[in-house]
C-alpha cells in the first residue's frame, strides 16, 4: 500500500480537503477570483509532503485546480547558504539549511504573488542531494510552470512561526537558562545570541509571506520529540530502498538543530494563532491533533 492509501493519511486528506473547499467557496463569495492560499504547518516527519500530494489529487478530482510547493523549495542557493554560514560562523543553527534565515523568502513571495495574479508562474525546486548533501536550487530552466489555479498549497515545518517580541524572548531565555523544564532542553545547547538570530530572522518571513496566506492547516503534536521517531522511520525507509540515509548519530545531530525552533515558537503559535490575509475573518485555521502514529485524534478551529 502506498503512503497515500493508508487510513491515517486518507483521513487527514479528507478532513483538510473539505475544509479547503469550504474556504475556497467563502473566498469566491467575497467575490474574488484569486486562488485560495493555504499554509500547511506540521513538524518534520508528520507527513506534510504526503498530505500535499493527497490534497492535490483530492481537490483535482473535485475539479479544483491545485498546485503545491514547500518552504524547502525556496532554500537559498548553495553559494548564498555558504555565505550565511560564514557570516554566522559561531551559530550552529545557521550552519546548514533549515532554520529561519536559510530561505529565499523574497522568492517565496514572488511565487505566491504570481499565482495570486493568476499568471503563469514557475514553481521553485530544490535538490537536497547536491553538493554533498548541502543542496542547491535546481536550475530555473527546469522549474515547472503553473498556470492559473484555484488553490495553492504551501507547506513547511516552520511556516507560520512568529518572532517573539523582546518581552516574550526574555521570558523564553529565562526558561532556557533558569529552569530545568524539559520544554527547553534542546535550546540549552545553544547560546542566547544563536537563538536570538533565528528569532530575528522570523520577522522577515512574517512580513514577506504570512499576509498572503488565507487559511492554515496545522498538524499539531503534544510532544515534538516525536520528530526523532518519525525522521528515523523515514531514514529506515530510505535505507531499505537502497538509497543514501543518515546514521543514527547524523540524524540526531541533524534534528537537534531544528528543535530550538519548535521550543521558541510553538507556545506563541498555540496562544496567538497564525498570521493570515484576514480576507476570510476568523476560524481560518484547521488544527488537527496527531498521535505518535500520525492519526488524527481531535480537530478544532480555535486559532
Image: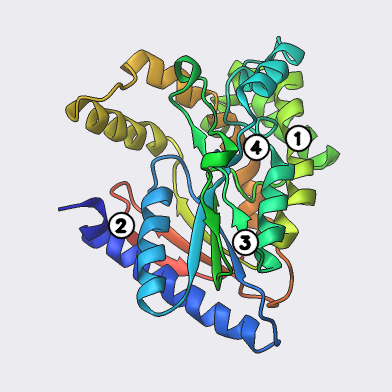
Q: Earlier in the sequence, mark 4 or mark 2?
A: 4
Residue 27 pos. (x, y %): 64, 81
Q: Quadrant of residue 141?
A: top right
The residue wearing badge 1 is 201
Query: Any mark on residue 295, and which?
Result: 2
The residue wearing badge 4 is 264
Q: CA distance from mark 2 to mark 1?
A: 33 Å
Q: CA distance from mark 4 to mark 3?
A: 37 Å
Check disc 3 and report its element: helix, strand or loop: loop
The residue at the point 60 percent across, 71 percent down is: 36
The residue at the point 64 percent across, 17 percent down is: 190
For disc 1, the neighbor class at 10 Å (few under 14, some 14 to 19, many from 20) is some
Q: Earlier in the sequence, mark 1 or mark 3?
A: 3
- Front: mark 4 or 3: 3
Q: Earlier in the sequence, mark 3 or mark 2?
A: 3
The residue at the point 50 percent across, 73 percent down is: 20
In the rendered view, would you say 191 is above or below 9? Answer: above
- Front: mark 4 or 1: 1
Q: Is residue 297 visible?
A: no
Q: How many marks?
A: 4
Q: CA distance from mark 1 to mark 3?
A: 30 Å
Q: Is residue 84 left or right of residue 299?
A: right
Q: Earlier in the sequence, mark 4 or mark 1?
A: 1
Q: Is residue 92 left or right of residue 7?
A: right
- Front: mark 2 or 1: 1
For disc 4, the neighbor class at 10 Å (few under 14, some 14 to 19, many from 20) is many
Amino acid at each position: 500500500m502506498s503512503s497515500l492509501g493508508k487510513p491515517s493519511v486518507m483521513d487527514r486528506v479528507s478532513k483538510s480537503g473539505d475544509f479547503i473547499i469550504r474556504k475556497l467557496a467563502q473566498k469566491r463569495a467575497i467575490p474574488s477570483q484569486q486562488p485560495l492560499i493555504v499554509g500547511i504547518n506540521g513538524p518534520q516527519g508528520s507527513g506534510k509532503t504526503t498530505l500535499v500530494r493527497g490534497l492535490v489529487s483530492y481537490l483535482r478530482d473535485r475539479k479544483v485546480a491545485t498546485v503545491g510547493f514547500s518552504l524547502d523549495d525556496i532554500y537559498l542557493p548553495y553559494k548564498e547558504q555558504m555565505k550565511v554560514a560564514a557570516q554566522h560562523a559561531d551559530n550552529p543553527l545557521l550552519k546548514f539549511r533549515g532554520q529561519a534565515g536559510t530561505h529565499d523568502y523574497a522568492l517565496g513571495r514572488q511565487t505566491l504573488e504570481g499565482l495570486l495574479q493568476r499568471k503563469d508562474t514557475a514553481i521553485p525546486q530544490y535538490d537536497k542531494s547536491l553538493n554533498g548533501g548541502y543542496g542547491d536550487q535546481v536550475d530555473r530552466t527546469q522549474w515547472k510552470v503553473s498556470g492559473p489555479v484555484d488553490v495553492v498549497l504551501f507547506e513547511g515545518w516552520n511556516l507560520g512561526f512568529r518572532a517573539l517580541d523582546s518581552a516574550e524572548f526574555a521570558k523564553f531565555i529565562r526558561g532556557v537558562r533558569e529552569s530545568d523544564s524539559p520544554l527547553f532542553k534542546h535550546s540549552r545547547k545553544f547560546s542566547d545570541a544563536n537563538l536570538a538570530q533565528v528569532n530575528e530572522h522570523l520577522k522577515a518571513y512574517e512580513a514577506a509571506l504570512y499576509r498572503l496566506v488565507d487559511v492554515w492547516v496545522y498538524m499539531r503534536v503534544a510532544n515534538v520529540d516525536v520528530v526523532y521517531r518519525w525522521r528515523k522511520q523515514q531514514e529506515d525507509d530510505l535505507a531499505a530502498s537502497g538509497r543514501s540515509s543518515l546514521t543514527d548519530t547524523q540524524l540526531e545531530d541533524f534534528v537537534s538543530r531544528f528543535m530550538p525552533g519548535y521550543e521558541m515558537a510553538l507556545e506563541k503559535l498555540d496562544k496567538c494563532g497564525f498570521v493570515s490575509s484576514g480576507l476570510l475573518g476568523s476560524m481560518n485555521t484547521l488544527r488537527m491533533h496527531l498521535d505518535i502514529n500520525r492519526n488524527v485524534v481531535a480537530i478544532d478551529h480555535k486559532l
